[in-house]
Every structure is written in C-alpha cells, then in structure tokens.
Amino acid sequence: MVVNIRIGIVDDDALVRAGLRMMLASDSITIVGEAADGDEALALVSRERPDLLLLDIRMPNKDGIAVTRALRKQGDTTRVLVLTTFDTDELVIAALRNGANGFLLKDTEPADIVAAIHQTMQGQPALSPAATARLIAAVRDAPDDSVHRARTLLDTLTNRERDVALAIAKGRTNQQIAQELYISLTTVKTHISALFTKLYVTNRVEIARAIYDARVNDL
C-alpha cells in the first residue's frame, strides 16, 4: 500500500472539509491543504503539489470539472478523485473525460474512501457502484460512430496488449494481470504504456472506457 500520500481537500462546505480532514489523517495520508472553490484549488495544487486532490464538483467560481480540465491542460500529474453528492450521467462522464481518476459519492463509507485513495495512487480506477453503472449505461447507449472508433483503435493492439486492456477493464491490478497472463510486472507496465499511446488515453479508466465503447464480448 502506498504510504505518505499528500492530499488536498477541495469542498465549498467547511464542515465537509473538517470531517474529511479528521477521517483521513493517518500515518499513510497527510492533508497538505484545503480549498473552498475552484480557483483556490488550482492555487493549492500550484503551491503544495499534492499527490491527490479530493475534489467536489459543485463549487463557486470554477467547478470540479473545470479544475480537472485545467490541471490536465497544463500537464499536471496530480491525481483527482471526485467526491460529490451528485451522480448524474453527465457529471460522471464529464469528470472522467476531463481526466479525473475516480468518482465517489459522499455517502461512501470512510474506509472505502481511504481504500479508493490508495487504489488511485496505485494507478487503479476508483468508481462508486453508482458511477460504474452510469458509465456502463452511457457506453451501452453510445452512438454507432463511437463504437466504430473504439473498435478501430482496438484493432491496432497486439493480442497481448488486448489481453492487458481487457484485464484492466475487469478491474485487475498490475500484479493480478501479471499472474493471470504469466508475464512480469515490468512487461505489464510496458503494455500499459503502449495502450496509453495507441488508444490516445491517459489513465486506466479511459482504457476501460475504450473497451466498453467497443462493446467487447469478452467481459
């Protein structure tokens, strides 16, 4: 498990920020700052360089999606874990498309939020069950041109790269992929780097999205 994760908390509700600070502070997590709106969030990232931003969506000035978009546009590698009370299809998809690494609801159990933080830092997608259901539904209803594009991209993969992509879509960790495919962790990471390039994605959630978009039958 990753230790000493430096986190920034962004929420316009001071009570929520206080509750998260009390809940998350531990030997493995350090809260490096708080922000009450999108502009403060960007300033926090610039000032403290946190490993992960626990980010609300609905806030004054810039919302959470705008913050995520701005971070990715400037090439910032801070991971973003959205934590919100809103779980509409549009928000889930918009957050992930703009570079969020995960999407959780605020009624998620504290232990599950902590687990999601560690999971995100390990490069694994962290999605609440509700968000996962909405993502799958959105992909299921995707127009045919989206399916065609996704399948065209998958056709560029080698058989082994496709196996790794399918395993990622099933939620497997790098260690699990290595064990299931009888390859080394280094080889798994090499294949994932190739997937980022060939599928034009930047994280594991987007790899899974490409697999779902293509409506692969192996899932």
Image (tube, rainbow, N blue to C red):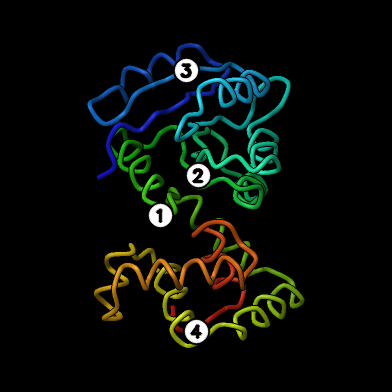
Q: Residue furthest right?
A: 145
The residue labelled by disc 2 is 103
* Marked residue nearer the N-terminal end (1 or 3): 3
The amino acid beneath tag 3 is Gly
Helix, strand or loop status at disc 2: strand
The residue labelled by disc 3 is 33
Q: Residue 99 vs residue 163: left or right?
A: right
Helix, strand or loop status at disc 3: strand
**Gap between marks 4 and 1 measured at Cα:** 22 Å
**Gap between marks 1 and 2 measured at Cα:** 12 Å
**Gap between marks 2 and 4 measured at Cα:** 25 Å
Q: Compared to 40, does 143 lie above or below?
A: below
The image position of residue 178, as x and y in percent, is 29, 73
The amino acid beneath tag 1 is Gln
Where's the C terminus, which quadrant? bottom left
Q: Residue at x 53, y 33 (%)?
A: 85
Are the residues flagged by discs 1 and 2 in contact, CB closer than 8 Å? Answer: no
Crowd band around label 3 with a 10 angstrom C-alpha radius: few (<14), some (14–19), many (20+):
some
The image position of residue 87, as x and y in percent, is 56, 42
Q: Compared to 77, does 215 lie above or below?
A: below
